[in-house]
Every structure is written in structure tokens, then in C-alpha cells.
Image (tube, coloured by chain):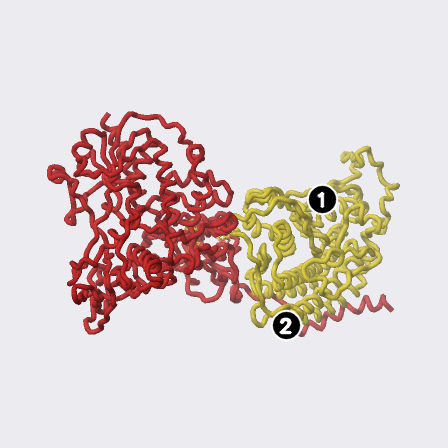
Chain colours: A red, B yellow
Amino acid sequence: MGKINDILSPFTAWKHLVNEPLTVKKPLEREGADRYRGFHKNEIDKCIGCGTCEDICQNAAIDLVPVEGIETKDGDSGLRPKIDYGRCCWCALCVDICTTNSLSMSNEFKWIDEDADNFLFIPGADDKPWNNSEKGWKKPDYNLYDPNRVDMQELHPEDRDKSFIEIVQGYSKEQALKEADRCVECGICTATCPAHMGIPEYIRAIRNDDLEEGLRILYDTNPLPEICGRICTHKCETVCSVGHTGDPLSIRWLKRYIADQNPSERFKEILGTDTIEQNGKKIAIIGSGPSGLSAAHYLALMGYSCTIFEKLPLAGGMMRYGIPEYRLPYDQIDKDINYILSLGVEIKYNVTIGKDNTLDQLHKDFDAVFTGTGLHLGRSTRIPGTEHKDVHFATDLLREISLGNEIPVAEKVVVIGGGNVAMDITRSMARLQNQKFGKVNVIATSLESEDIMPADREEIVEAREENAQIIPGWGPQSIEIKNDKITGLHVIKCLSVFDEEGRFNPKFDENIKDFFEAEMVIESIGQGMDLSYLTDEIKENLKMDNRGRIIVDNNFQSSLEWLFVGGDIIQGPDVIHGIANGHKAAIGIDNYINSKK
Amino acid sequence: MSKLFNIKEDRSLFPEKNEQGKIDIDLSSHKYLKLWHGPQHPGITGNMSLEITLLGDEVMDCETHVGYLHRGFEKLMERRKYIQCFPIVCRVAVPEPDFNEYCFASAMEELAGIEIPESAKWLRTLVLEMARLASYLMWIGGQAGAFGQGIIGQWTNYLRDSMLDRFEELTGGRVYHMYIIPGGVRGLLPSGFKQRMEENLKFIEQMMKDVERVMFNNAVFKKRSVDMGIIEKDWIYKFGITGPNARAAGVPLDVRKDNPYLVYPQLDFEAVTATHSDIYNRADVRRRDLLMSVDLIRQIMAKMPQKGEIRAETPNVLHWKVPAGETYSKAECTRGEYGYYMVSDGSEYPRRINVRGPSYTHAVSLLEKMIINCNLADIAGLMVSLHTYPPEIER
Ligand code: SF4
Ligand code: SF4
Ligand code: SF4
């Protein structure tokens, strides 16, 4: 039976004679699935050329290349991925890891071309029929790196609103490792950092738990890591590619972690600076702010003997006298400065050039002079009432606080300004009011609306946490004075601060008015420089621009070849520009002195 | 004639073996013929070749040669970061990329101590069974084709293609799925997937009835496969034979049962076995295993969670340092035990990855033993019945 069946059974296949044949759909006629990993697309304006796609591609199919019409700028390398379809395996890892989500794939899979070279193309820049296709592979609902920042432990507002204890507690090892893991090593930050710090490299050192290597990398470009690790304006974080679809890396806190974890007594050993050969040349430096200290550090490493002339009783300039202790504790400033002093740098305190000594004398006594005297003069709004004795400059008050002197504190205070200095004085005032009156009544008001306020976001948030009021978008009109006492500040609505060309040209609506009650007004609308130490003879030969700024070349050398200038009076104002200027100036001075030989 | 094929090792009619276990072949005697079977011969599964010595139509001696498809994957991976190995591993066994992806990912997860989300476990099991189904459908055409039945291959390749359609919409790729990523999977089921899958499964079941009638209940096929190429039960452990090759001999080796992984413990199935591992038996075990995959896919789709996380949190893949250690991770592929032995020295790169594909035992030592006394015309059918993929021999 079985045998007969085995002969007949195959013939049942004949029934398929009347059926449609089973054949596969022709590829040219079928469309790829919605999720198909087909040809690449790139939103070219959203892409920042971070190269992370290139890094992950195991086939080395991606190359980052310049593209016409795309400029290199902060946060954008100006390059775009070019893909070689002779190498690509359409794994889409590049799409999944793309930091901006600009890269995706269409569901198109047919491309016929005679020239093999055409299969090397720049998605998004080259015009391709699939550029507008909606379908295809997009980054799935997961992350190949963590987009969320590791939270920083901070003192609770209630624990900090009366004291000047440091708020930010710093990362633990575990937290630092987790945060460092998020970096994609693109280097976008390095390009933007004024000092071009080796950020991905020191973050990698954290991951490798090699903090000594980390410290060496920090000191390559920045001799003030404890300070910068706390108060740097972190332009790097603003551009960090991970920040495009998540939180940027906490670059600043990671730097602080490295500096904090290395004990200061081992710095010289770790950095290999126990003995430095002296070259017998002497450099004078005016001002012990970031630029002066940075110049001194790098010059000292090259064997120069540096003497810093400082007007105030302690070193650090604006870092000590402008930034409140709760943000930057004095012992941390000392840690950085003491290391620089240990390299043989000398500081002469309480010496004002132009009074106790002259620039001409320095020129005679030293081989070159660097000056970084910073912006210490307060600027006034010059509105009616500013001449009253209870109107102060923020910089003056902050300096007095740092000097340990008592400053006037009123029950109601208005601060004019929206930058970090304004926040510093507002938050310092809040603390002092709390100490004196047990309550806070301080208003900070700026021309800028909140979205364009120059202060760091966290400063605004923390100031509010400490019960200060931040009221942006108002223009100060006049200070009302009754019986010789300030009663408050009249303001009108500010509609816009900059004109179409981006120039400072505020527009107001006079009909919208307000009045902030106050017994004391503090102005914090920027600072000016004091160049009174430049004698007439020097000024005659020194090239300056029409705004009174000294003109310098790339190495911060002025038109007087022995005089180098840097810091806030040239660029900034901020610490990291000062550090970068000082470093470059040190190289410039070395070149200058070598050229004289 | 081909009855000789059953006389295991009865070499009394043929020349003595020398000390090296080879026969002394004097080609100038004109008694023997040396023939290279493959690597381009259509009857060879994949790119390998058999150096055969024939006496008349019968194989006297055979040496297998691999290396035609050697791409150095294992070495390559030592120079790739872990995530960069992920698009490579699927290429080790082209018709069944998913087992490679799974073993690689699960070895990493085990070393790193990562538990993948529940949804990902179900989806992984689903694609593994889909891969099994697709691979069997391709194999069955090969087995029929090797014995001259072209039509079966046409039907089952069409069926396999319908499964590739499902792969395409789930994973974004038809052949190289790159779906099982370390930490989880790369996507949830698209909407309407289950319905389309069910239509495919129904059609596959219906066509498999025809395949049974035309291929299995077929006097010609039986004539060429029954009692041919028998694997004895006592060879199983000696040779390291696994999968259907072992199960057809009555040894119920199935990693899904023996070392349950993913969600297999929650599925209802039994290892498919037979008693007499000849070509016919093995084909029948695979046919039933194929139908069991259909059933398993249905079970999975009915029981799996509808949504949920698809991937566990892992370190940044760009510098994932897998903790130092070693592990062996395995799964049941269509041909038996598939395994990845992974050694990590704690760096960003794997120190050593060794791929254990069942073809290594089945297509080299086992084949060399079984092919003796085989008729030249039966070699292709014998090879396909061992279901081997040369690329996984030469990783
Ligand atoms: S990862 Fe994305 S943003 Fe970065 S270069 Fe590639 S495509 Fe552009
Ligand atoms: S799809 Fe994969 S292989 Fe192709 S460019 Fe992207 S990462 Fe490279
Ligand atoms: S910190 Fe951000 S910008 Fe810098 S290398 Fe890392 S990911 Fe790139």
C-alpha cells in the first residue's frame, strides 16, 4: 500500500498547474519596508560633523570631509560624513549613535550607476532621489551612550543661604566614572575651549582611573584646574555634541574631579617639575590674575625667572576678589597658586605699578613684561540718582567681601545687571541679608529677557533657590531719593536689547513701568579697565584701537616688542581666555627672547 | 552498488590502509581516479571541496578542504571594539545570522552581568525561531534538489522569502538582520506584524503538506535516502554530533531543552527525535522541527508582552570595557549546538572569540568517515543531509 502511495502521491503536485506560480516579487518593483536600512540621509544643517558615526563604523566606510557652504564654527567642525558604499554593510550603527539625530536611512535600495566612484557620496549634501523619503531606518528607542548627566550633589538651599560654604560638592569616583563614560570623544569641545584643553583625553584618563595622567593633560594647557574646575564658563559644555539630544558632559566637574583627587603635595612629582633648568632670563608680570599666573607658569617651566607684581594683598585677581567664596573657596585658589609658586615664581604683593614702581623701570630691569591687569573699574548706568552714596559697584563690594571687610547691607536691595557678576553680588547680598536680618529681599533686574540673560543658567536657578528675585527685561530709569535716602528704582519695559545687526541698541516701551523698592542699589553692568600705569611716552608708541584697547598680535605681543598684554583687557572677560592668553604670551615671550640672542 | 554505502567500514574489498590511515594510491595503475568535488560544484553546500579518490563510482578515500571562504572573523574581532563585532558576527553563518548575534550578545551580557528586558527576551526568541524556519525552508530545497527534485526548492524558497519579508519589516534587513544587539534588540514588532506572520505561517503549513506528499511520500526519494548514510548512536558523543543529526539517531540533544535560555522554558515543545538516522530520517526530523518552529512562533506571538523596554542600559558602546573573564554561550541552531566562547581581558576589545559551529564536526570528521563507499551520485545528498555551512568552519 505504502509503495503505491509513494508512486502516486508526488503526482498531486499537478494540482498546482492551475495556480499562480510561486515566484519572488521583482526587486525593482517592490518598496523597502518602513524600517528598511537603505541608503543614508543626513540633515546637513543639523549635523555638526562630530565624527561619532565615523568612529563606530567597523568598516571604515565613513570619512569626515569639508562640504561647500558649511563653515567651521564653535560646535561644528564644518565637516560632514562621506560614505563609501563599497565598504558599508548597512548596519545602521552610525544612525543609532548619531549625536544630533541628523543621520538616518531611507528605505531605498536601488541605485544603478556606471561609475563606481559615484557610490562614495555625502548624504544630505549630494542630491539624491531618496533625500525626501519618509520611510527607512531611524534611531531606535534606545541609547548607545547615556544621554543623562550624573547629578551633582549640592548643598540644599536651606543649608547654604546664610553661609559662604562651597555649594557644589564634587563627584565621587563612581559618579565621575559614570559621567566620563558618556563622552563620545569627538573633540568638538576642544576646538571651542579657548585654551583648547585635551578634554576627551582627560575624560578618558578618568575612565582609565589614571588621574595622574589626567592631571598631566590638564596642566598641558591649564595651570589653574581647581579654579577652572569650579567657575569656568564652560563654553565646551555649550557645544558638547552629547548635549544635542541629551545633557552635555559635565566637563567642568570632571576637570575638578581630577584636580581634587590628586594631592597637592604630589603635584611636582606627578607633573615632573621637581627640577627645572634656569635660563637666567627675567620676566616681569603685572597682575596675578589668570593670565598673569598662566604666563608665569609656562614661562617658569621654560626656565624663566618670573616676578609678579600684585596690587592687592593676595594673589588671584578677579578669581579671588570678584568671585564669592561659595562658588570658589579660597583654599582652592591657594592650591593652584601655591603650585605655580613652587616652580620658583615670585609675587610681590601690595605693589601698584604706576605708583610704587613704573613700567619703564620694569622694562629696564627685566627682559620682557607681561601685563594682565584685568577689568576692575565698575561701570555706571549714569541714570539720575547714581551719585548717591548708597549706590555701589558690584566689583567694589565683592572685593571688600573677599578682603574680609564689612560692607553696607540694606534690608531691601536692587541689583542692576544680568551677568554672572550681578548674580554673584545678588547671592552674596542674599546671604548677608539672611545673616543680618534673617530674611532676604534682593532683586536683580536686567535689560535682557531671561532667555538671553548672560548669566549661567544654574546661577539664576540657584539665586532663586536662595530667595533672591530675578526680574529680567527691564531698563533702569532713575533712582528715587526721598529725604536723602534711596527708596527704589524706576524701570521701564525693555522690548529688545540688540538690533538686527546684533549691535547693542535697546528698545523700550515707556508706557510699561514698574518700581522696585530698595534702600540700596548696586550696579553691575560691566567693568572697565584702568590703564593709568601706561606713561604718556609708552602710550605714544603703543598701538591702540579706537575703543582704547591695546592691539596685540597672535602671541599677545603689543607694538612695543618687549610688552605683552593679555587677559580681560584683551579678550573675555573670563578666566579661561586669560589662561589661554597667558599660555600663548609665554610662548610669544620665549620666541621674542630667543630672537634677540 | 550503493548498498555498499551501508557497509560501514567494510573495506575488505578494497586496498589496505597504511599507517597513516590512508590507502596507498597508485594513480598510474589506472585503477583509481582523483576527483575534486567543489568548491564550485552546485551539489556542495557552500564553498568547500572534497578531494575524493574513486574506484569506479565509489569513494575510496576523501579529504575535506576548507578555507575558500576564510575571512578571519575571529582574528578580526580581536581588533574591533565589542560593538563593532556586532555587524560582523551575522556573517559567520549566512542563512542563520541570528544565532551568531544571539550567542555573541549573550556572552557579552553574561560577562558584563546585564539582564536584558523581558520584551527583548521574547523578541530574541521570536527571531531565533523565524531564523530556524527560514533556514530549514532553504535546506529542504537543497535536500530535494540534491536528489533531482527541483520544484521543492522553488516552493520552499518562496516560503523562505515570505519569512525574509517579516525579517525585513522587523529588523530592517532581509539577510543580515543585525537585530540582536548587545543589551537587547533593536525594535518592537511593527503594527500588523502578527497578522501578516500568521498568514505566512498558514501558507507554510499548507505548502508543507504538499512537500510531504511530493518529497517525503515519494518512491524515488525513499529509494535514494532510506538506509543511506546512517549515523550510529554510539558516534554521537565520540564525534560531538548535535542537533537533528543526533536527534534522528534517537539521542534527544536540543539546547533549547537541555540548557534552556531566553523564554524557551515558558514554551510548550518537545525535542523532535527519530530512531534510525539515515538521510530520510534526518530529513523527516527537520521537517517536523520546521513545523514545530511554526508552532513556537505562534506561541511566542500569543504570549509575548505587547510593549516594553527593548534594550537594557549598557556602558557607552564606544568604550565598553567588558569585565575580564571567559564564558561560553550557546543556542540550538538548525544544525545543532551553536556556541561562542568569549574571553575578555577587561579592555575595550575582545581578547579571543571562538565560534563553535556544528558544521565543524559534521562536515569535516563525520563526513570524511561517512563518505567512504558512498556512490559518487550520492555525495551531494549525503552532504546536504548533514546540513553543513562551510563558512562557520572557517571563521
Ligand atoms: S554622528 Fe551625526 S552629527 Fe556627528 S558627524 Fe555623524 S551624522 Fe553628523
Ligand atoms: S551603516 Fe554601518 S557600515 Fe554603513 S556607514 Fe553606517 S556604520 Fe558604517
Ligand atoms: S565632552 Fe562632549 S564635545 Fe567633548 S569630546 Fe566628549 S562628547 Fe565630544
For the residues carrying marks 2 and 1, which lies nearer the camera in this image?
1
Can residue B92 be spotted in the picture? no
Type of the residue with mark 1: Leu
The residue nearer to you, when weighing A12 against B168, is B168
> Is disc 2 surrounded by few (<14), some (14 to 19) or many (20+) residues within 10 Å?
few
The residue nearer to you, when weighing A181 against A348, is A348
**Which residue bears the numbered disc 1?**
B50
Above or below: residue A265 compared with residue A140: above
The number of numbered discs placed on residues in the rendered structure image is 2
State yes or no: discs 2 and 1 in contact (Cβ < 8 Å): no
Do marks 2 and 1 share a chain? Answer: no
Chain hosting mark 1:
B
**Which residue bears the numbered disc 2?**
A20
Q: Residue furthest right?
A: B12
Q: In the image, A169: left or right of B238?
A: left
**Residue A338, x across and y down, in percent:** 36, 37
Q: In the image, A8: left or right of B322?
A: right
Classify mark 2 as within 8 Å of ligand 2 or not, answering yes or no: no
**Residue B369, x across and y down, in percent:** 79, 45
Q: In the image, B141: left or right of A87?
A: right
Element at label 1? strand
The residue nearer to you, when weighing A32 against A49, is A49
**Residue B316, x across and y down, in percent:** 52, 52
Q: Quadrant of residue A154?
A: bottom left
Q: In the image, A226: left or right of B296?
A: left
Q: Quadrant of ligand 1?
A: bottom left
Can residue A313 be spotted in the picture? yes
What is the quadrant of the C terminus of chain B in the image?
A: top right
